[in-house]
Amino acid sequence: MILHVLGSCAGTEPMPGRHHTSAALEAGGRLYVLDAGEGCAYTAHLLGLNLMNLQAVFLSHTHMDHIGGLAHLLWTMRKLCVLSPENSRRMQDREIPVFLPEERAFSAILDFLRCTEGGFKTVFRPVSRPMTDGLLFNDGVLSVYALHNHHWEPAAGEPWKSYSFSVEGEGKKLCYSGDFKELEEVLPLAEHANLILLETGHHRAVDLCRELLASGIPFGKVLFFHHGRAILKDFEGELAQAREVLGDRVSFAQDGMRVEF
Ligand SMILES: [Zn+2]
Ligand SMILES: [Zn+2]
């Protein structure tokens, strides 16, 4: 499995060289997008990823730094179909499921897109799918599981509003934290993961490294992403501290980074 970092930044003001959070997974010649921060389609396309291979989108929650690029992603896919009869043929009648905890956000984005070029008539069909705990998706290549967390507390009676994921396929496992409150919310997904993506928008990398070790779960490598302002002020210093705990098992994500695992 190959992970491409399309955006490594948390919901800060614009930062040089970084876009808001998004990752693309490549497996079995297919593409899957985890979170869709601004610029995700731009970065994916310029990295040479073929958006016509996209199977599904998984949005951990509907904060802007995770959903701000969804409209442009769908728009770019439509544009690539308009520009190429071959793309258009390939995408004909394909359903592109978008899993998210807040259906209203998806309908609003589609309404907005219908006010753009061509009324956003597409040969493919973007459809929303509800987010729930447990198995969300299995296309025979990848299985995606979701688990809610307390990053965004719902009001009484409301459904959970933020999730983390684990993805399994090709004999590998990825844990994707999205935003979370406590590491223990993510641990059930992180156990036996070959690669764990943890966010630094609300946590210090060195603290999470210590907590991971103390948890006693088996895991492979850790990639920190969703960088907040604090870590960006001293990127090398924070990385050095994290490496004192986990050595070269730890990396810090950059936009455009490719990680094979
Ligand atoms: Zn965020
Ligand atoms: Zn958030």
Image (cartoon, rainbow, N blue to C red):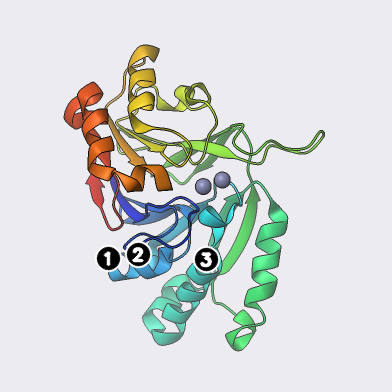
User: Residue at 65% across / 60% down in the picture?
Assistant: 106
Q: Secondary structure at mark 3?
A: loop
Depth order, front residue of 47/25 = 47
From the top left corner, tell me how far across and down residue 30 is, in percent: 36, 55
Q: Nearer the viewer, mark 3 or mark 1?
A: 1
Q: Which residue is mark 1?
A: 47
Q: Quadrant of the N terminus?
A: top left
- Res 157 → quadrant: top right
Q: Residues within 10 Å of mark 2 (few under 14, many from 20)?
A: many
Exactly how many numbered labels are in the figure?
Answer: 3
Tags 3 and 1 touching, CB below 8 Å = no
Q: Is residue 171 above or below residue 23?
A: above
Tags 2 and 1 touching, CB below 8 Å = yes
From the top left corner, tell me how far across and down residue 161 is, in percent: 66, 41
Depth order, front residue of 242/1 = 242
From the top left corner, tell me how far across and down residue 257 is, in percent: 25, 53
The picture quadrant for ligand 2 comes to top right
Query: Which residue in the rendered view is the most extreme toward the right?
Result: 157
- Residue 94: which disc? 3
